[in-house]
Image (cartoon, coloured by chain):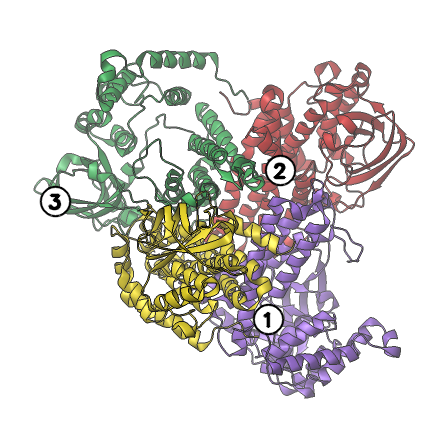
Chain colours: A purple, B red, C green, D yellow
C-alpha cells in the first residue's frame, strides 16, 4: 500500500504540469480569441502531446496512447487543478466514439469521429421511449429499409440536449418479428436536421430544458448509417472499448460536493453562530464524511486494481447508487443550512454572485441524478443480480 | 372521547375539494403556475363564496364563528390540491384582528375579510430566518421603516399585517406611501412571495392582547402542518396511482416489490400523522397548556415529512416526475415553502423539546 | 372533535374505579393468598360485574356484555392505572376462545373455554413450520383419520411457550390432494401431554426460551377435536369474533416506551451532563415524539371510528409496522444513551434493581417484534395490496 | 499510487481465514460460545504459530516487524469469523511496550508476546465511558488502587496494561497481590470481559513517550474498525446466502425484490467502506497528520455500520435469525462490543469533526 505515485508517474506528472504551464491559459494574441476557440486550440495541442482522446487512433483525431489508467488519472488531476479544457463532454465523445471504434465501419469512423472530437458534430442519444425507460427491449420506434434508406417512425424521450445536436444514435426495431425481443433491435445514426424529425425540449422541474422528446415521422437515413448489422443493436449498445474513462466511480464529485457543503456550513448562521459549530450540523457532517471518505478510498482501490488488471468486483456496480445516496444526504444538509433561501428559485444561469439559492439546483438536481441513467431501483437490481448473485426475477 | 370529524366537517372538506376539482384541476393549476403573475382571483373568490373567508370570523362580524380545526381541515384540502390561494395570510390577519384589534379595527376589517373584499397577508421574516415574534426587530411606532421578506401573495394583497419588535402588530395598507413591494423569485408559484421595504410608512397598530403574537404564530404552524398533510397524502396517492398505470418490463411498476415497499414506507410516514395537526388545531382552541407544543410538533413533523415524501414521489415517477409538466413538481415546491416558512422543522423540533418539559 | 368522554362513559369510568377501589389489591385474609390465587379471585369478581371476557357468554365463564369499544378502552385504562389483573394473556384467550365461539361445536365450547379463561388450560399455537413461516398454505404437517382418531405427523416451529402448554391448536394438512393447497388444511386441537409429541424449546438471541419446536410422531387426537370441517382450516384460522380487542393498534405501547426512553435520557449522562440536555439527543427525541404522537392520535382516531362503526381504512393495516419502526428508533436511541452498558447481557429475570442493561432486552427484542407475527416485508405486502390497492404479485 | 494489498498481504489473510475455517468453524464457535468460560486457548495458539503474535514486534525482539495495516487486515479476518481470541489486547500491549517501554521491558516482554507465552490485555475504562487517555483517573504511581471495567479477556490474561491519569501506562501481573478480577456478564462471548479492582497493586510503569497513549488509542480504533468491516461483510454474505437458499411461497426469498433491495442497501453501506480502515491503518504508520482523524472516522463509521448491518441481517433471516443457534446472533453481539468499546461512534464522529479542522 502506497498512496504516492511512483517516480515514473511523478515524472509524467511533471511533464503534464510543464505542458499546462506553457499552454493554458493561452497567451499573447491567442488569449484574445473567443473562449471556445481558445479551448479548441488548446485541445488540439493536448491531443498532439498525447493527453486527450488517448484511446482514439491518430488518424481519427485522437492521440493513440497505450491505455494507462494512472496516467489518465494524473491528467485529470492536473488539468482539473488549472481548469484546463478536458475532453469534450457529451454522449458523442463518451458513447458514440467508443462504439464506432469498436463496431463501426471504416467510412463511419473516418466520417464521424474526427468532427465529433473537435466538437463540430454534436450528438444526441436515442434509447429511451415513453414506455421503455429502463427496459430497452421494449423499444417500439420502427425502422424499415425501403429503396436503400431506413424509414424511421416513432418517439424517443429523455434525449439530453437534442435541441442542439446535429445527429442522433438511435435504437430502433428493424426486425419486428424477432424473438427474443431485443434481437429485433438495430443501432442507426440519423441526421436530426430533416423534415421528418421534430424535437421538443421538455422543461424540467428546475425550470431548465436539458431533455427532449424527439419524434420521427418518416425520417430517413442512408442504409449504411447502421452500426453493426440489423438485429445487432442490443450488442452494439453494450459495446465499450477498453479506454481510460475514470475508474473513480464519481468519488471526486462526492468529495468536491462535500467540500462545498462544509464551506456553506461555515458561511451561514444558525442561532446567530456559524452553522459549522452547531452540534447537530457538525455531527451530521461527520457522519457524511464517513460516507464520502469511503467513496473516495473505494475509488482509490478501484483505480489501483484497474491499474493492476484486477477486478474490483462488487463495488463497481455500486458507484452510481453511492453517489446518489451521498447526493441525497448533501441535499438534506444543504436544505437545513440555507434556511429561508430554500423558498427561492434556482438561478437559471449560474453566476459567481449567486447566493445560497444556487443550492436549490443541487437539492432538486439530486433527484435527477437518482433517476437519470437507470433509476436507483434498476441499479439495485443490477447490484443484486450481477454483484451479489441473488436469483434473477 | 371522540377524535373524529363531524359529518359537517366531512362535508365542508368535500365541498372545498369538489369546488377545486372543478375550478382548479391540474390543467388550470399548471396554466396559473406558468403565468407571469401566478395568481387567479376567481379561485379565491369561489372559496370566499363557499364561506372560507368567513369561517373563523365571529358571527357578530358577519362570520361563521368556527374553530381552528375547521380552518385546518380546509387547509388540508388546499394543500392536497396545491391551491394557489392566499388563505394563510387571510387566516392569520383575521385571527390577529379578532384577538388583538381595537373595536374599530374589528368593525372595519372583519366583515371585509369575511366577505373577501380585501386580500390580506402577513409580513414577518426580516431575513436570516426571523420568523418568530421574539425575532422581529421592526420598531413599533406609527411610522414603519425596515424590510420584510417572503410575504406570501405580497404583490396581490391589499392589507398587510406587519410583525413588530416585542411581538406587536400593525396593519398597513398596501398602497400606503413609502411602501415598496418587489416580487421575489420564489420556488413555490402557488404562493408567490414578495419583499417589502418600508420607508416611514403609516401604520395602524393593533392594541394587542396577552399572547397574541404566540397565538398567531401557532395558527400559522397548524395551518402549514395541515397543508403539508394534505399535500403529502396527495403525493402518495399520485405515486400509487402512477405505479398502478405505468408499465415497464410488461407489467405495472407497482407490482415490483422494490417500488411497492418504497411506496408503503412513504405511506406509513404520512397516513398516521394527520392526528398531529388535528390535535394541534383542537388544542389551539381548547387545551391552552398543550397548544404551543402541539403546534410546534405538528409543523416540524408534517413539513419535514411532506418535503421528503414529495421527493420520494418524484423518484417513484421516474423521468416524468422530473419534468415541469408533472404535477409532482408543484408539490415538491409547495413542500419547500412549507418547510422553510415560519422556520424550519429543526427550529420547531427544538422548541417542541423545550415545551415538552424535558 | 372532543377528547373528553361523554357523561355516560364518565359514569361508567367511575363505576370501574369504585369497583377497583374495593377489589384490588385484595384486603384482609385474601391479601395473604399466593399471587396467582389473588389474581384468579379478582378476575372471577371482575367477570361477575362485566369487566373481563365481555364477549364470552356467561355459560362459558365470560361476562356476556354488549360490545362497546369505549367501555373496553376505559376498562383497560383504569385497570392499567392500578395494575389490576386483566384478561389472561396468551393465545388461548386471545385466539382459541374467539375461534371456538365462532366455529366450535357446543361440547368444544363447554369443555375448553371455561378452563382456558380460568388459566387452567394453557394453549400453544401450531401454525408455522420450518418451511412455512408466513406462508400458511405450505403447511406440511399431516393428519390422517384412522380408527376414529387423527394421526398426526410433522413439525411445528415458533410455538410460543409450548413447553408450558397443555394443548395446541394445530393447522394440519388432512386432504393431501386438495387444490388450491390451502383447501387441504384442517384446524385441530391436540393434547400435548402424550408420547407422540416432543417439545424442544428454542433458545433465542436474548438467551431466553420463549419459542418451541414441536414434533409430532404419530400423535393422536380424537376425531371430534377438529374445529369446523376437514378442509376448513384456512377459514377457521381467519375467523375473528367481533369483540372488544384494543382498537389502539399498539399506540399505548409506543407511548410508554417513549416515556421510559425520556426517563432514561434524564438519568444518564453524556459529556458529564444529563443526556437530555445534549442537543443531538434532544433533537432525536423530539423527532421520535413526532412519530409517537402520530401513532397515539392515530389510535384515538381508530378508536373513535370503531365506536362509530366507521372503517379507519388504510391505517389499520399499518399499526404493526408503525410500532416496529418506533421500536427500532427507540432501540437506536437507547443504544446511544446506555453507553458501555451496551456491552452487557440482558438480565434474564427482571428485577427492580436492574441497571441500564435491561434496555438490551428492548434493543434486541425490537428485532423480534419486527419478525414475529409476519415480518415487516410481509406487512408491507399486506399494506400495499389491501391498503394502497397496488397490484398483487 | 497503489491503494491495494500486496500479494503477501492477500496470502496472510487467506492463511488466517483458512486456519479459522478449520480450527473454529461455526459448530466449534458455538460450542466455545456456550462454555461457562467461553475461551479456547488452542485457537489463539494456532494464530500465534501463524505469526499473528509476532507480526508487529520488531525483528530485534523475535518479531516480524510489520505494520498496522498488516495487523488490521488480520483483524478484519478475525472479525469476519467472530474469532474468540485476545488479539485486541495483545496488539495494544505490544504496541505500548514497543513505543513506550524501557529497554528492560522490551527485552522482557516483546519476545514473550511474539511467541504467545503471555496473554495480554488492556484495562482502560473506569466506568461512565472513560475510554480515552484524557479521561483516565487511576493515579500513576507504582502502587495502583482503583477500578477498571470491560477488560477484554480479563480473566484469561496474564499481563495487563493499565491506563493511568495523564495518559500514562503501567504493566501489572495478573497474579499480583491486591488485584481482584471478576467476570462481567458481557453480551459478546467471543471477547469475554472482566472488572478489575486494584488495591495497592504493584505495577511496573512504562517510561512512556510523546503521544504514546494517543498512538495506543488510535491502534485500538483502527483494529475495531477492521474487525467491524470483516464482521459486517460476513453478515451481508450470510444474509445473501440465506436468501438464496431459503424458500417461501415456492421460491427463494432472495428473488423477492423487497428483500433483494434491502440486501443491496445493506451491502452498499458496507462494501465501499473497507478503505476507511485501510487508510487509517496506513496513516497510522505513514501519515502522521491524518492518523488521528482517520482512526476516529474509521471507528465511528464502521462500528456504526456493523451494528446496523448485523441487525438488518437478523431481520433478513426471519425467525431463524432470532435464535441462539443462528450465527448472526454472535455477530450482533460482537457488533455491540465494537460499538461501545473505546467509546461510541458519536464520540468519535465528534472527534473526527474537530480533527477535520472545520
The numbered mark 1 sits on a residue in which chain?
A: A
Q: Which mark is residue B228?
A: 2
**Residue D201 location (% of width, % of height):** 37, 49
Q: Considering only vertical position in the picture, is B203 above or below D16?
A: above
Estimate how packed mark 2 is, as few (under 14), some (14 to 19) or many (20 or more) residues with alpha carbons within 10 Å.
Answer: many
Query: Residue under circle 3?
Result: C196
The numbered mark 3 sits on a residue in which chain?
A: C
The residue at the far left in this view is C147
- What residue is shown at x 50% (from left), y 51% (from top)? D132
Query: Residue under circle 1?
Result: A171
Q: Considering only vertical position in the picture, is A92 above or below C352?
A: below
SS of the residue under disc 1: strand
Q: Are marks 3 and 1 in contact (CB under 8 Å)?
A: no
SS of the residue under disc 2: helix
The answer to which quarter of the image holds residue B118 is: top right
Q: Is residue B84 visible?
A: yes
**Residue C188 location (% of width, % of height):** 20, 38
**Residue C148 location (% of width, % of height):** 9, 39
Amino acid at each position: 500500500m502506497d498512496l504516492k505515485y511512483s517516480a515514473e508517474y511523478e515524472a509524467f506528472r511533471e511533464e503534464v504540469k510543464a505542458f499546462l504551464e506553457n499552454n493554458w491559459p493561452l497567451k499573447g494574441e491567442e488569449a484574445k480569441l473567443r473562449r471556445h476557440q481558445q479551448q479548441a486550440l488548446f485541445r488540439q495541442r493536448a491531443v498532439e502531446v498525447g493527453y486527450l482522446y488517448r484511446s482514439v487512433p491518430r488518424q481519427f483525431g485522437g492521440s493513440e496512447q497505450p491505455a494507462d489508467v494512472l496516467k489518465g488519472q494524473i491528467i485529470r488531476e492536473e488539468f482539473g487543478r488549472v481548469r484546463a479544457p478536458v475532453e469534450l463532454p457529451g454522449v458523442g465523445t463518451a458513447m458514440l466514439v467508443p462504439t464506432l471504434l469498436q463496431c463501426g465501419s471504416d467510412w463511419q469512423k473516418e466520417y464521424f469521429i474526427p468532427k465529433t472530437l473537435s466538437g463540430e458534430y454534436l450528438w444526441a442519444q436515442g434509447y429511451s421511449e415513453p414506455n421503455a425507460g429502463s427496459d430497452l427491449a421494449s423499444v417500439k420506434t420502427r425502422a424499415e429499409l425501403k429503396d436503400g434508406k431506413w424509414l424511421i417512425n416513432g418517439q424517443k424521450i429523455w434525449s439530453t440536449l437534442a435541441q442542439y445536436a446535429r445527429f442522433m444514435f438511435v435504437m430502433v426495431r428493424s426486425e419486428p418479428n424477432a424473438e427474443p425481443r431485443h434481437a429485433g433491435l438495430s443501432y442507426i445514426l440519423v441526421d436530426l436536421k430533416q423534415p421528418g424529425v421534430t424535437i421538443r425540449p421538455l422543461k424540467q422541474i428546475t425550470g431548465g430544458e436539458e431533455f427532449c422528446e424527439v419524434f420521427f415521422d418518416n425520417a430517413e437515413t442512408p442504409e449504411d448509417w447502421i452500426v453493426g448489422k440489423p438485429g445487432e443493436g442490443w450488442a452494439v449498445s453494450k459495446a465499450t472499448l477498453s479506454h481510460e474513462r475514470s475508474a473513480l466511480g464519481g468519488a471526486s464529485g462526492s468529495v468536491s460536493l462535500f467540500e462545498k457543503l462544509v464551506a456553506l456550513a461555515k458561511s451561514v448562521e444558525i442561532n446567530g453562530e456559524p452553522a459549522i459549530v452547531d452540534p447537530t450540523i457538525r455531527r451530521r457532517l461527520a457522519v457524511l464524511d464517513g460516507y464520502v471518505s469511503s467513496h473516495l478510498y473505494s475509488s482509490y482501490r478501484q483505480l489501483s486494481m484497474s491499474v493492476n488488471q484486477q477486478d474490483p468486483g462488487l463495488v463497481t456496480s455500486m458507484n452510481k447508487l453511492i453517489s446518489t445516496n451521498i447526493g441525497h444526504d448533501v441535499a438534506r444538509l444543504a436544505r437545513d443550512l440555507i434556511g429561508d433561501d430554500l423558498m427561492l428559485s434556482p438561478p437559471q444561469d449560474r453566476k459567481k454572485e449567486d447566493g445560497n439559492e444556487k443550492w436549490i439546483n443541487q437539492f432538486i438536481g439530486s433527484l435527477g441524478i437518482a433517476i437519470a441513467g437507470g433509476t436507483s431501483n434498476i441499479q439495485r437490481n443490477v447490484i443484486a443480480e450481477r454483484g451479489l448473485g441473488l436469483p434473477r426475477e | 372521547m371522540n377524535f373524529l370529524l363531524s359529518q359537517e366537517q366531512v362535508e365542508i372538506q368535500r365541498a372545498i375539494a369538489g369546488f377545486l376539482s372543478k375550478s382548479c384541476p391540474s390543467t388550470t393549476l399548471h396554466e396559473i403556475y406558468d403565468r407571469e403573475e401566478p395568481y387567479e382571483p376567481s379561485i379565491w373568490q369561489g372559496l370566499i363564496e363557499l364561506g372560507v373567508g368567513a369561517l373563523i370570523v365571529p358571527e357578530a362580524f358577519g362570520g361563521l364563528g368556527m374553530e381552528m380545526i375547521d380552518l385546518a381541515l380546509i387547509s388540508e384540502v388546499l394543500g392536497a390540491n396545491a391551491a394557489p390561494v392566499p388563505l394563510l395570510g387571510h387566516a392569520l390577519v383575521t385571527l390577529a384582528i379578532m384577538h388583538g384589534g381595537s373595536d374599530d379595527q374589528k368593525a372595519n376589517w372583519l366583515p371585509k375579510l369575511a366577505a373577501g373584499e380585501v386580500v390580506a397577508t402577513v409580513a414577518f421574516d426580516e431575513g436570516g430566518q426571523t420568523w418568530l415574534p421574539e425575532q422581529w426587530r421592526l420598531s413599533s411606532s406609527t411610522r414603519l421603516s425596515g424590510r420584510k421578506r417572503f410575504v406570501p401573495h405580497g404583490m396581490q394583497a391589499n392589507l398587510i399585517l406587519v410583525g413588530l419588535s416585542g411581538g406587536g402588530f400593525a396593519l398597513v395598507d398596501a398602497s400606503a406611501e413609502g411602501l415598496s413591494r418587489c416580487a421575489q423569485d420564489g420556488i413555490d408559484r402557488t404562493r408567490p412571495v414578495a419583499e417589502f421595504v418600508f420607508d416611514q410608512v403609516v401604520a395602524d397598530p393593533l392594541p394587542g392582547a396577552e399572547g397574541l403574537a404566540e397565538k398567531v404564530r401557532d395558527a400559522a404552524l397548524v395551518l402549514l402542518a395541515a397543508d403539508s398533510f394534505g399535500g403529502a397524502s396527495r403525493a402518495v396517492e399520485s405515486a400509487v396511482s402512477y405505479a398502478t398505470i405505468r408499465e415497464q418490463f410488461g407489467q405495472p411498476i407497482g407490482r415490483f416489490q422494490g417500488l411497492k415497499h418504497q411506496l408503503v414506507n412513504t405511506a406509513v410516514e404520512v397516513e398516521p400523522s394527520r392526528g398531529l395537526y388535528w390535535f394541534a388545531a383542537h388544542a389551539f382552541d381548547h387545551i391552552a397548556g398543550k397548544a404551543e407544543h402541539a403546534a410546534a410538533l405538528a409543523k416540524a413533523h408534517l413539513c419535514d415529512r411532506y418535503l421528503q415524501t414529495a421527493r420520494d414521489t418524484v423518484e417513484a415517477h421516474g423521468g416524468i416526475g422530473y419534468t415541469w409538466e408533472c404535477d409532482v413538481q408543484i408539490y415538491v415546491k409547495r413542500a419547500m415553502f412549507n418547510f422553510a416558512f415560519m422556520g424550519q422543522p429543526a427550529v420547531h423540533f427544538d422548541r417542541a423539546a423545550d415545551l415538552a418539559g424535558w
